[in-house]
């Protein structure tokens, strides 16, 4: 009897929270809404240490927080959510910790593809962003499988940055741009004798690498630049994350560790974005 009453009470509280959240989101949507929110998942290890939990527990708690943020972003109508899950620098950690994180990543990727997962419930498309060749083969294969399995989902997008850093992204984009330009030059030289319209001036102009060439080859070309970047634990460093894309991005650094992030932090970030929105639009028009 007590179990039945307790279960009913939990359902009522959960239902009340759901409708209160929907009402709050409708009020927020009266203002300008972000299209893309990015997260630096800072504080998972400190969360476990602070609570004397087993190593790795913080990362599992952090995954649950990611799923909560994904649900809230979907309900808000945010089309893109990006998370900084694993930096290239993280490979410098101990072999045991890196292996644990790879195993956990594999476990969670497989979990995302289950029929009852939030990904399938909300029709979320998954993109893995970064130098995926650095990942263990089972993780890389699982990531590719997840991207393929969700390719037809169109409601929203979850971009998971793994084996990622902005330095590597910019280097990759520059190298790919140079290679692409070299291929174009070779093709122009081949066709030059057959086409009189290909002048020295045109050939010289086509040698130049433009901004659009770099942006076309970035890992993050799949999404618009983020409107909001949230880094937990009170840190204000970007830590080599989305340096190319955050020129006109609102930064928010709540002091909570990432597993502790909640609805109130996301709401405050959106309100802060709305407060700065007129100024951001003015800057974009001047560019």
Image (tube, grey):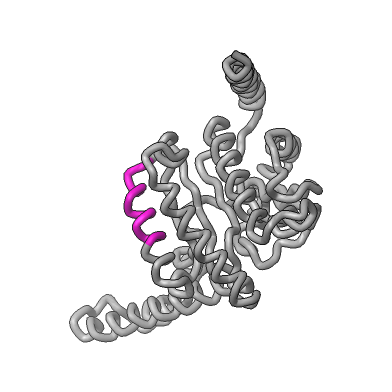
- Tell me which corner region of the image, top left, top right, bottom left or bottom right, holds residue 94: bottom right
Image position of 54 with respect to 92: above or below: above
- Tell me which corner region of the image, top left, top right, bottom left or bottom right, holds residue 13: top right
- Is residue 26 visible to the viewer in this orientation of the structure? no
- Tell me which corner region of the image, top left, top right, bottom left or bottom right, holds residue 132: bottom left
Residue drawn at the location 44% of the way across and 80% of the way down: 178
Position of the C terminus by quadrant: bottom right
Residue drawn at the location 55% of the way across and 41% of the way down: 70
Depth order, front residue of 45/51: 51
Report the magenta stretch's main SS.
helix
- Segment colored magenta: 142-153
Q: Is residue 242 magenta?
A: no
* Residue 212 rendering spot, x and y as whole percentages: 48, 64
Q: Is residue 47 left or right of residue 214?
A: right
Position of the N terminus by quadrant: top right
Q: Residue furthest left?
A: 194
* Residue 133 rendering spot, x and y as whole percentages: 43, 74
């Amino acid at each position: 009897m007590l179990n039945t009453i307790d279960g009913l009470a939990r359902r009522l509280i959960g239902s009340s929270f759901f409708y209160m959240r929907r009402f709050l989101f409708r009020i927020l949507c009266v203002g300008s809404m972000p299209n893309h929110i990015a997260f630096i998942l800072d504080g998972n290890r400190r969360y476990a240490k602070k609570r004397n939990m087993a190593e790795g527990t913080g990362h599992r708690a952090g995954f649950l927080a990611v799923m909560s943020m994904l649900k809230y972003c979907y309900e808000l109508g945010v089309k893109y959510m990006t998370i900084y899950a694993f930096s290239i620098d993280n490979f410098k950690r101990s072999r045991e910790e890196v292996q644990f994180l790879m195993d956990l990543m594999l476990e969670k990727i497989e979990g995302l593809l289950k029929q009852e997962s939030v990904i399938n419930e909300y029709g979320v498309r998954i993109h893995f962003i970064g130098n995926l060749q650095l990942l263990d083969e089972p993780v890389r294969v699982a990531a590719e499988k997840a991207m393929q399995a969700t390719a037809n989902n169109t409601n929203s997008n979850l971009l998971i940055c793994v084996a990622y850093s902005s330095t590597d992204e910019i280097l990759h984009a520059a190298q790919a741009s140079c290679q692409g330009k070299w291929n174009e030059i070779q093709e122009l030289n081949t066709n030059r004798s057959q086409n009189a319209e290909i002048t020295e001036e045109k050939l010289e102009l086509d040698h130049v690498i433009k901004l659009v060439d770099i942006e076309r080859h970035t890992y993050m070309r799949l999404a618009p630049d983020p409107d909001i970047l949230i880094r937990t634990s009170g840190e204000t460093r970007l830590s080599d994350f989305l340096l190319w894309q955050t020129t006109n991005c609102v930064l928010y650094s709540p002091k909570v560790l990432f597993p502790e992030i909640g609805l109130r932090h996301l709401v405050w970030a959106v309100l802060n974005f709305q407060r700065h929105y007129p100024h951001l639009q003015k800057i974009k028009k001047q560019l």
